[in-house]
Image (spheres, grey):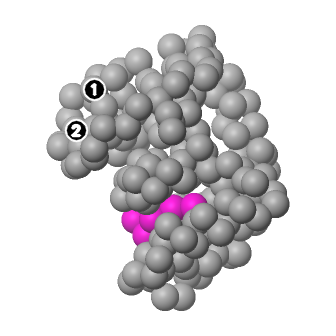
């Protein structure tokens, strides 16, 4: 059975969307190793339409420039959307209808992890249906100071409890906190 792993980059004040303002200041050599390892352990990505719309053009434009970009472009991708019909990013399938059942079927297949970047409606759906296996918060030592309520991790979600299963502290101050949901 495969594991679904969510990796969310976040500031101390909960900002998960304005990464262009803070993320790269803390993405050092250790973070690069962690990001490569996280992607290498996975053989599929799952995302919502908004993430797809950001990732597809950004990663496609980097094709052939480095191994990480090539892996992002070549990996199997699943997009949860009721509006996207013909994704043009390579190896991409749209999941619609009973998404929880479709994701459960993907988990039951043999293979590596299914990786999700960011935290949004797809993550909430997986939490509500007991499908998320690991939650990695890449906590950046900065207060964004500009996040709007819609930019924050902690919104519109019922209570879910987790066990801390790992910590990784980087020289830049970035800390990767790994949690598993309590069932």
Residue at position x 59%, y 82% in the image: 88
Vertical placement of 94 versus 100: above or below?
below
Residue, disc 2: 147
Name the N-terminal-most of marks 1 and 2.
Answer: 1
**Visible in this render: residue 61?**
no
Vertical placement of 32 versus 122: above or below?
above
Asked whether residue 88 is drawn in magenta, I would say no
The stretch of residues the image draws in magenta is 46-51
Can you tell which quarter of the image residue 12 is in? top left
Comparing 23 with 104, the one in front is 104
Can you tell which quarter of the image residue 103 is in? bottom right
Residue, disc 1: 13
Vertical placement of 159 versus 2: above or below?
above
Q: Secondary structure at mark 2?
A: loop
Can you tell which quarter of the image residue 58 is in? bottom right
Cα–Cα gap, marks 1 and 2: 8 Å
As drawn, is 7 to the left or to the right of 125?
Answer: right
As drawn, is 65 to the left or to the right of 156?
Answer: right
Quarter of the picture containing the N terminus is bottom right
Residue 162 location (% of width, % of height): 47, 29
């Amino acid at each position: 059975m495969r594991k679904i792993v969510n990796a969310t980059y976040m500031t101390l004040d909960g900002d998960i969307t304005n990464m262009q303002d803070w993320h790269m200041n803390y993405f050092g050599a250790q973070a690069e190793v962690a990001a490569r390892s996280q992607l290498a352990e996975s053989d599929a990505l799952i995302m919502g339409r908004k993430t797809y719309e950001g990732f597809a053009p950004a990663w496609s434009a980097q094709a052939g420039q480095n191994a990480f970009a090539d892996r992002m472009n070549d990996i199997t991708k699943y997009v949860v959307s009721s509006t996207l019909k013909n994704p043009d990013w390579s190896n991409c399938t749209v999941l619609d209808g009973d998404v929880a059942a479709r994701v459960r079927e993907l988990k039951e297949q043999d293979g590596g992890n299914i990786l999700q970047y960011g935290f949004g409606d797809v993550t909430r759906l997986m939490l509500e249906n007991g499908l998320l296996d690991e939650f990695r918060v890449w906590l950046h030592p900065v207060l964004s100071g500009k996040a709007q309520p819609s930019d924050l991790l902690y919104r519109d979600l019922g209570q879910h409890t987790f066990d801390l299963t790992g910590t990784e502290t980087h020289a830049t101050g970035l800390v990767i906190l790994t949690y598993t949901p309590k069932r």
